[in-house]
Amino acid sequence: MEDTNSLPNPNAAPALLEKFRHLMGLIRFSHTIFALPFALLAAILAWYETGRFRILDLVGILLCMVFARSAAMAFNRLVDRKQDALNPRTANRHIPAGLLSVSTVWTFTILCSLGFIASTMLFLPNTWPLILSVPLLLFLLGYSFTKRFTFLCHYWLAAGLMLSPIAAWIAITGNLSWTPVMLGLSVFFWVGGFDILYACQDAAFDKESALSSIPAYFGIPTALKIAALSHFCMLITLLAFWHFANLGPLFLGGIVVIALLLLYEHWLVKPSDLTRVNIAFFNINALISVGLLVLGIVDLWI
């Protein structure tokens, strides 16, 4: 008689695929588009400056970006799972909704962290990425605790994403210059501004739960002004980046278009109407990040 326990489980593969799909939803994998284009733009400029392209550098940048962001997002969901369960806007996230277990997300976080550290070895003989990998990862993971002690949490997140073009430049060139620093600062002010806009949705909940954020601390009208100032600073640093990278009129024209997109983003979000925050958060910002990458490539090409 055949031992039924030894037969393969026909439901195992679909269950694994479903778990993988939930994990990608947990970390909002599609949002990688916000930071990755800036890292790639810095890499392209570094290859252009050094006159040396290595496929391993490209693979390393892609893997490091994906693993670092996935680890940070999964860890954030672990740290915030109790608050997410209490917040009506986030109660259906994967851990509070029971779609993923805490142990599964912990395992995923650890594997992604190890994957990030291992991926930095692709840049050898440049040892800087490997040396800096653990401090950088700890900084990224540390963001998850910032709402417990500072309303500047948005800019901790912004600093994490700011490091992506700077890290890509260091990984390829082994040094630092004003070009990646100005691009990184543009990311810093851009992310800080749109994260403030996004956090306006949770201003009341954050205040009631003793969580820190600029909208909860200053109120939504003032928070929107701070976000606008942050985006103005982004435009200034983009101009500085354009200058130091020695880019042409095409990229400069792109900065004008980005200024118009940011104005539209702030027109969409009003203190009395936050229903269009998600449109402003994803659609416009994805267009800005991808647009800058495309403009940078075309500008160099011509």
Image: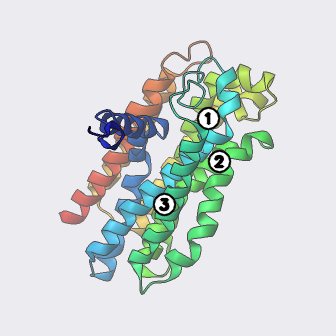
The amino acid marked with disc number 3 is: Ser
Q: Secondary structure at mark 2?
A: helix
* Residue found at the very far bottom of the displayed protein: 125
The amino acid marked with disc number 1 is: Ile
Q: Is residue 232 visible?
A: no
How far is the residue under mark 3 from the one under mark 1?
20 Å
Which residue lies under the disc numbered 1? 196
Q: Is residue 126 visible?
A: yes
Whole-percent x and y of residue 157?
Answer: 61, 48
Q: Secondary structure at mark 1?
A: helix
Which residue lies under the disc numbered 3? 164
How far is the residue under mark 3 from the one under mark 2?
15 Å
The mark nearer the N terminus, 3 or 1, is: 3
Q: Residue at x 32, y 64 (%)?
A: 247
Q: Secondary structure at mark 3?
A: helix
Q: Residue at x 60, y 65 (%)?
A: 136
- How many neighbours does mark 2 have within 10 angstroms: few (below 14), some (14-19), or many (20 or more)? many
Whole-percent x and y of residue 273?
Answer: 56, 13
Q: Is residue 213 above or below residue 34?
A: above
Whole-percent x and y of residue 15?
Answer: 37, 34
**Left or right: 250, with 69 as reference point:** left
Quarter of the image where the N terminus is located: top left
Nearest to viewer (mark 3 / mark 1):
3
Q: Quadrant of residue 10?
A: top left
**Left or right: 54, with 137 as reference point:** left
Q: Quadrant of residue 102?
A: top right
